[in-house]
Each structure stands twice: as structure tokens, then as C-alpha cells.
Amino acid sequence: MTRQKSCSPTGSSLSNRYHLHVPDGRRERAPFDTNSCLERSEMSSSVDLRSYRTWVQGLPPAQRNPAKSAIDKFCQLQSKRSVSESDLSLLVSAVRNRFAPVWEVGTDLLFRLARKHAAARDAIRSLMCSTKVTDRFHVIAMLGHLSESVAFPKRFSMELIRTALRDKGNRVREKGAQAAERLCLTELVPDLEACLKTECNESPKWAMQHHLLLLRDGYYLEYINGSPELTIRTKDGFTSVSISKDDIRGGKLPSIVAEMQADES
């Protein structure tokens, strides 16, 4: 058994439900571009505002100015007892921005306010109903990626993910499945199973199967160039190991999973 990689955030025999068919060369796309400050881990911890301000100074003006405006507005709102829809306009505009550094900052800050303000949660709902697929993608791509979203009311997170799983956009559906798994929302297993049965597009279908197996079963088995590789969910993300076909035939999978989860705990 050879450990291949480890990533961090979010019976005695093997049945077919643990097998994942992966198209040749298929791997999950990184959701953010290489200039992103938030793509460094499976579950990014909160970025302090001083670091944000320092970071945005290095951006081109077209990105720096809206990002800075969003940060300034958040600083005005974070200590208020209540916020209104109009208060959030700059943050919502940042979420809708086409540049990844801007929409990541804007979504992060809007998520922070949504922890305690209903108006911010309503703004997120509106973005998830936007006619622009990019608006919807920006929200769902960050759900579960940011530690702020872990503090959302569970019912609210489930509402957003269920909306995403029914979305017309392929990448939105992919990220909806990912968010369910990252947030460990096992209540959404029936939703993922139902969506998987009707999904026709290969990319979101693969994502749904991938995240469903991790969420429901805690692991999945795939074959890379004919060799079995086991991916196991841990408390900090997931880890993958190469195993042998003899391990599978010998019914060793449960003990390997238990061992790997214990090592990562």
C-alpha cells in the first residue's frame, strides 16, 4: 500500500457502489485561477482584513479598486447590529465581478456578514437565482471552501446546495455536489443520489458520484491505468493510497480505510 497524496480543507467485501468510473485523464478542475489568494487549501481559514488590504495593493487597478471598496464597506458594516439590502450593494457587486481575486474577496466578506444578518443571506439567495451563471457559480464555488460558510445555519447551506444541484449550469451542479461533501451534509445524500440518476453531462455526473461516495461511504475506489487507487475521507479533507488487486480480492479494504482514517485523525 503506497500513499499517494493527502489534501486538507472540508463489510468484508467491496460492492459496486464503492467503485468510481473516472474517464481517462479526468481530474477535478481547480475552481480558482493561479492568482487567487484563497485556493491554497480544501477549507480556507478566515483571512484577516490587514492581509487582504496588503494583498489587494498588488492587484491591477481594475481589480484592486473594487476589491478595496468591498473591504472598506465590510469594515463599516461588520459591527452594525443590522444591515439592509442597500448596505450590501458594493459587496454584491464584488461577488459579480469577473475577476477571481475580486469575487473571492467579495464572496468571503458577504459570507462573513451572512453568519448573523438575514439581509446578507437574502443577498446570497438572490445571487443563486441570478440569470447569470457566473454569479451563481461564484457563490456555490466558495460554499464549503471558506471556513465562514461552516458557521452558516445548516438549513441555509442545504437550501443553497439544493438550488445548485438543480441549476442549468454544469459547473454550478459540480460545485453543489462538492459543497455538500465539504460541509459533511449527509442529509443531502438522497438529493445527490436522485440527481445522479438523472444527470446526463459527464463532468457534473463524475463530480456527483465522486462527492456522493466520499460523503455517504467515506471512500471510493478508482482505477488509474488499470491500477486501483483508494481515496479516503478524513477529518481534514481526503487522502489517497495505491493498493493492490490482491488487497481487494482479500477483503482488506475496510481495514485499510480504518487504518488511514486513524492515521489522519
Image (tube, rainbow, N blue to C red):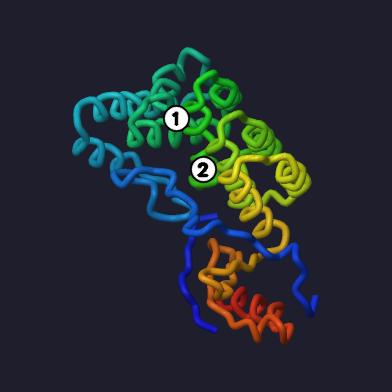
Upstream in the sequence, badge 1 or badge 2? 1
Q: Is residue 163 above or below residue 181?
A: above
Figure quadrant of residue 124? top right
Question: Foreground: 141 or 242?
Answer: 242
Q: Is residue 70 above or below residue 264?
A: above
Instruction: Please give the residue where the numbered disc 1 appears in the rendered image.
Output: 78
Position of residue 105 in the picture relative to residue 57 (left or right) = right
For this orientation, the residue located farthest to the top is 86
Label 1 Cα crowd, 10 Å radius (few <14 / some 14-19 / many 20+): some
Q: Residues at badges 1 and 2 in contact (C-beta under 8 Å)? A: no
Q: Does any portion of residue 153 appear in the rendered image?
A: no
Marker disc for residue 148: 2
Q: Is residue 89 above or below residue 26?
A: above
Residue drawn at the location 69% of the way across and 49% of the way down? 185
Label 2 Cα crowd, 10 Å radius (few <14 / some 14-19 / many 20+): many
Residue drawn at the location 61% of the way across and 40% of the way down? 201
Question: Given the image, on which type of amino acid does mark 2 rest?
Answer: Glu
Residue drawn at the location 60% of the way across and 25% of the way down? 125
Question: Given the image, on which type of amino acid does mark 1 rest?
Answer: Gln
- Measured Cα–Cα span from mark 1 to mark 2: 14 Å
Residue 18 location in percent, x, y? Answer: 71, 65
Residue 175 location in percent, x, y? Answer: 55, 42
